[in-house]
C-alpha cells in the first residue's frame, strides 16, 4: 500500500489534541490530589518563556491565554498569539472579527442562534469541572480580570454560582451575540468535544419539547 503523507494541517490538529490531553491529565490528577490527599495544596500552571535569554524562567499560563502580550521576568514583551495557537485558541484580534460561522446540522432544533439564558448557563456550569470553566472563559473572550471580579462578586465558595456570575458578565459584554452557538464554539476551541456534544444533547431535549 502506498504511504499517505500527513498534511501540516492534520499534524497540527493532532499536536493540539495531544497538548489538550496532557493538560487535561495534569489538571485532573492535581485536582484529585488536592481533593483526596492534600486539600491545602495550591498549584498553578506555567510555561517556559520563549525569549532568548540564557536562564530558564516561566510565564503564567492563564495570562498567556487571556492577554495579547505578557512581560517576562526580564521585562521583555512576549506576544502570546503563537502560544494560544498551540492550544487551539484564537488571538483577541481573531475573536473580535465579525464572522458568521456555519451552524451545525440540526442546530435550528435547539434554537442555537438564540441568546443564551440563565438555564443554559446552569447547564454549562453543571457539566464542566472548575478548571474547564476557566479555559472556557478564555475561549469565550472573557478577560481574566473580569472573570475574577465576577467570581468575587458572587460572594460564595460555590463553583457553579461563581460560574453563573461570570457567564452573566459575558452576556452583558456581548449582548445579542451571546448565543448558545457561541458557547458551543468556545467548547470546540478548548477541544472539549465530548462536553460540547453532551450540551447539544441537553439543549435538544430541552428545546424540542417547547
Image (spheres, rainbow, N blue to C red):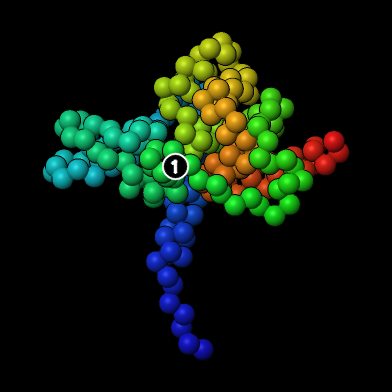
Name the residue at 41% across, 22% down: 145
Q: Quadrant of residue 78?
A: top left
Q: Is residue 172 left or right of residue 206?
A: left
Q: How many marks?
A: 1
- Please state which of residues 36 and 134 is positioned toward the viewer in this rendering: 134
Residue 49 x %, y %:
25, 41
Image spot of residue 103 (x, y percent):
64, 50
Identified at 54% across, 41% down, the residue is 186
The vertical placement of 183 against 103, above or below, is above
Q: Residue at x 73, y 40 (%)?
A: 111
Question: In terms of secondary structure, where does tag 1 sit?
Answer: loop
* Residue 129 appears anywhere in the view: no
- Quarter-of-image position of residue 77: top left
Query: Can I make out residue 123 in this image?
Result: yes
The residue singled out by tag 1 in the image is 97
Residue 169, image x, y percentages:
54, 22
Q: Quadrant of the C terminus?
A: top right
Amino acid at each position: 500500500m502506498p504511504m499517505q503523507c500527513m498534511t501540516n494541517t492534520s499534524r497540527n490538529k493532532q499536536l493540539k489534541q495531544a497538548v489538550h490531553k496532557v493538560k487535561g491529565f495534569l489538571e485532573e490528577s492535581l485536582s484529585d490530589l488536592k481533593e483526596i490527599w492534600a486539600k491545602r495544596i495550591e498549584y498553578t500552571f506555567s510555561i517556559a518563556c520563549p525569549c532568548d535569554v540564557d536562564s530558564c524562567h516561566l510565564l503564567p499560563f492563564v495570562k498567556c491565554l487571556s492577554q495579547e502580550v505578557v512581560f517576562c521576568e526580564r521585562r521583555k514583551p512576549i506576544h502570546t498569539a503563537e502560544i494560544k495557537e498551540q492550544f487551539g485558541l484564537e488571538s483577541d484580534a481573531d475573536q473580535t472579527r465579525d464572522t458568521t460561522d456555519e451552524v451545525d446540522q440540526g442546530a435550528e432544533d435547539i434554537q442555537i442562534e438564540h441568546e443564551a439564558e440563565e438555564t443554559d448557563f446552569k447547564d454549562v456550569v453543571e457539566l464542566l469541572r472548575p478548571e474547564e470553566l476557566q479555559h472556557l472563559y478564555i475561549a469565550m473572550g472573557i478577560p481574566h480580570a473580569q472573570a475574577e471580579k465576577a467570581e468575587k462578586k458572587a460572594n460564595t465558595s460555590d463553583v457553579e454560582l461563581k460560574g453563573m456570575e461570570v457567564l452573566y458578565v459575558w452576556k452583558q459584554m456581548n449582548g445579542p451575540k451571546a448565543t448558545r452557538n457561541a458557547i458551543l464554539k468556545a467548547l470546540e476551541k478548548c477541544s472539549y468535544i465530548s462536553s460540547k456534544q453532551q450540551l447539544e444533547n441537553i439543549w435538544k431535549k430541552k428545546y424540542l419539547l417547547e
